[in-house]
Image (cartoon, rainbow, N blue to C red):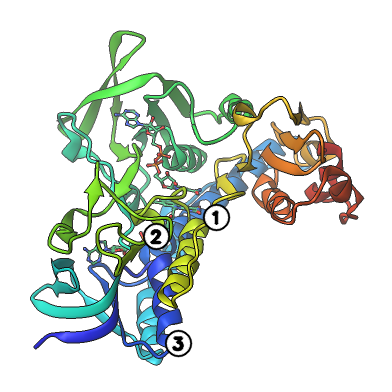
Amino acid sequence: MARQMDLAVIGSGVVARSVATAMAGDGWSVAVIDRKPPAGTCVLRGCDPKKVLRDAAAVVDRAARMQGKGLAGTPVVHWPDLMAFKRGFTDNVPAQQEGMYRDAGIEVMHGTARFTGPNELDVDGETVTARHVVLGVGARPRPMDVPGAECLIDHEAFMELPALPGRIVFVGGGYIAAEFASLAARAGAEVTVLQRGDRLLAPFDPDMVAHVSGALPPGLTVATGAEVTSIERQGGVFVVRHRIDGRQAEVEADCVVHAAGRVPDLDALDLAAGAVDTEGGRLVLDDRLRSVSNETVLAGGDAAQVGPPLTPVASHDADVIVANLRGEARCPDYGAVPSVAFTIPPIASVGLHEADAGDDVEVRGADATDWFSARHVAAPVLAYKTLSDAATGRILGAHLVGPHADEMINLFAVAIRAGMTVSELRDVMFAYPTSGSDIPSML
Ligand SMILES: Cc1cc2nc3c(=O)[nH]c(=O)nc-3n(C[C@H](O)[C@H](O)[C@H](O)COP(=O)(O)OP(=O)(O)OC[C@H]3O[C@@H](n4cnc5c(N)ncnc54)[C@H](O)[C@@H]3O)c2cc1C
Ligand SMILES: NC(=O)c1ccc[n+]([C@@H]2O[C@H](COP(=O)([O-])OP(=O)(O)OC[C@H]3O[C@@H](n4cnc5c(N)ncnc54)[C@H](O)[C@@H]3O)[C@@H](O)[C@H]2O)c1
């Protein structure tokens, strides 16, 4: 006997939770289906646990910088204790989420969902029919076609390691490599990042990235233009071979981590059976996040990757999906999505990039490492770049690196969303001495 629902949501992350609770609140019958314990990537396997590890490593970094400046004795990361502390933020969450769903009258199904018809799903042998299906299935590590790829562990396994390996290689040079390498090096590992591209952190301003690359801690080596060609297990050690500057090189490691990008996790869904079109491994969606071939199916977040695969985007997509399920006609707006890579120091970005700016855009930027905000914490880097419309003064973009860049970027996001001009933002009184009080000098 099939379960008949108004809405089946596949996934239980940011997209799924928001859509499911909103529609259940409207009186719809809703099922949330996940093959993993509910709560999704950000809370259980991504942003939150990563930030716990990273912020502990940042304490070590800050203390090390202050040696001889009033602090003596550097703290060390005790990995097993840090893991236990991290688990305090994750272990209870699935049960809490199940309780929350139950209280909201939402059915939680554990299993892998796949389409068996345009409005019908199979969930490990159980049939669910639904007027609408929302795909909040997220992303998975991009399959790597190199010999020995099975030796790679992913970020999830990395965050479960009982002990920090002595030597770690990260394959890739984006968010995951930069953040995890940064924290692992501060935690005491010898870390190598093998990045195929010509710099770390391609989505960020190249000048800000250069500051991050120039402030790498001891124990962290970044090789750019390095394409991994094979990984070989030799006893308990891995040999990671790569091509760099036209020659072959190799590096040994105790652990090799996949950080080479994530793709929408669509394979298990049998989308053809659901009449849901894909192209090149991506869903084909209209401007309201509906499948072009089956309008009763909508998708958002990392599964859709219409906007950048970030939590605030997943949350925004969920709002758009809810509006469209309610019969409104809403399109997503990805203008001014703030983004932070929680490297040590953090790097942040919002809005227009210099590379995309025309002649009518004013760009101001500087190395501000000699400002008080950096000097009083012995920070090795503080730099900024701001962009504004030359004619109207409207703020269009901001790119930051250094202490509190991760928080400051939100102030710029507010200014851009609110359509503020340079003179309006300069007029704001910021509490002093805070990093926010540097903002008028950045404009
Ligand atoms: C290591 C890491 C760190 C990150 N840090 C940040 C950060 O600091 N800031 C930020 O903004 N973003 C960060 N992100 C990105 C952010 O986590 C994602 O953009 C966000 O979680 C996407 O949410 P979602 O709802 O689209 O999917 P997810 O939260 O990934 O949910 C998808 C769920 O669908 C389930 N699923 C998939 N297929 C099926 C199926 N066929 N049947 C049943 N269930 C299925 C999966 O088990 C999963 O639980 C990070 C990502 C990673 C990997
Ligand atoms: N702080 C955050 O917001 C945060 C943190 C972690 C992850 N994320 C999200 O998760 C997504 C996935 O992260 P990611 O770091 O895996 O991907 P990414 O897309 O950020 O970076 C992948 C990098 O791997 C490199 N690469 C690909 N194949 C390679 C190979 N064979 N050899 C060497 N390098 C190779 C690419 O050049 C690219 O720079 C990101 O796009 C991001 O949106 C966000």
Count of numbered labels shown in the rendering:
3
Q: CA distance from mark 1 to mark 3?
A: 25 Å
- As rendered, which of 308 and 274 lies closer to the eye? 274
**Image point (69%, 31%), residue name:** 380
Q: Are marks 2 and 3 in contact (CB under 8 Å)?
A: no
Disc number lying in front (1 or 3) = 1
Q: Is mark 3 within 8 Å of ligand 1?
A: no
Q: Earlier in the sequence, mark 2 or mark 3?
A: 3
**Disc 1 designates what residue?**
333
- The image position of residue 184, as x and y in percent, is 45, 41
- Reading the image, the residue beneath label 3 is 25
Query: Mark 2, residues whose alpha carbon is within 10 Å: few (<14), some, or many (≥20)?
Result: many
In the displayed structure image, the side of residue 274 where residue 131 appears, left or right: right
Q: Which residue is mark 2?
A: 289
Q: Is 274 or 327 nearer to us in this picture?
A: 327
Left or right: residue 360 compared with residue 305: right
- How far apart marks 2 and 1 lie (CA) works out to 12 Å
Query: SS of the residue at dot 1?
Result: loop
Residue pictured at 87% horizontal, 54% vertical: 430
Q: Position of residue 428 (x, y in %)?
A: 88, 54
**Element class at badge 2:** loop
Q: Secondary structure at mark 3?
A: helix
